[in-house]
Image (cartoon, helix red, strand yellow):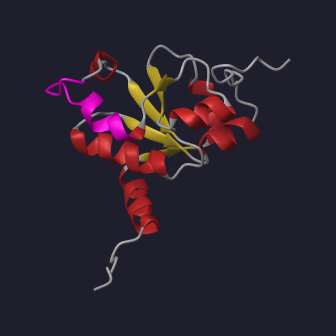
Amino acid sequence: MPQTITTGYKALVDAAEREIETLPTEEAIELAGRDDTVLIDIRDIRELQREGRVPGAFHCPRGMLEFWIDPQSPYHKPLFAQDKKYVFFCAGGLRSALAAHTAHLMGLKPVAHIKGGFGAWKRFGGPVEAPEPAPGETKKA
């Protein structure tokens, strides 16, 4: 019997965005480097290697988010125990809405996500570190 999906990803993202803050890209760029804010990049490592990264952003693969946030987890990262604002981003702003919502439901506060994600960050002129070459490759000039 085929599956009947009753709630699609768009509905999940819309629900998440009703409960969390969605930052305009320009505002998120202004938060970069502040002591009271942590930018959380939830993209896959291959995306970082291909597209580059936001300087100073903490990389937390989406699949580890709940484990790294929870202080009871053996994988907990102390970064998530600080009294700071956590701003999540992905490539386009969908996964980060879901990630920020999950973090919010877990009790991490305050949280937000960047509208348009890393793609918008680059389009609006946010700082980007060039991708590192894959093992065995040489860095392009």
**Most distant residue in the top direction:** 35
Above or below, comparing residue 65 to residue 127 in the picture: below
Left or right of 84 on screen, residue 10: right
Left or right of 108 on screen, residue 84: right
**Front position in the image: 94 or 61:** 61
Residue visible at 23% across and 40% down in the picture: 106
Q: Is residue 20 magenta?
A: no
Above or below, comparing residue 72 to residue 33 in the picture: below
Residue visible at 57% across and 47% down in the picture: 115
Above or below, comparing residue 78 to residue 16 in the picture: above
**Front position in the image: 22 or 40:** 40
Number of numbered discs present?
A: 0
**Most distant residue in the left direction:** 72
Above or below, comparing residue 15 to residue 37 in the picture: below
Residue visible at 55% across and 49% down in the picture: 93
Q: Position of residue 107 (x, y in %)?
A: 23, 37
User: In what quadrant of the picture does the C terminus appear?
Assistant: top right
**Most distant residue in the right direction:** 141
Q: Position of residue 48 (x, y in %)?
A: 60, 31
Q: Position of residue 96 (x, y in %)?
A: 47, 45
Q: Quadrant of residue 5?
A: bottom left
Q: Quadrant of residue 123?
A: top right
Residue visible at 31% across and 79% down in the picture: 3
User: In what quadrant of the picture does the N terminus appear?
Assistant: bottom left
The residue stretch that appears in magenta: 63-75
Left or right of 130 on screen, residue 17: left
**Most distant residue in the bottom direction:** 1
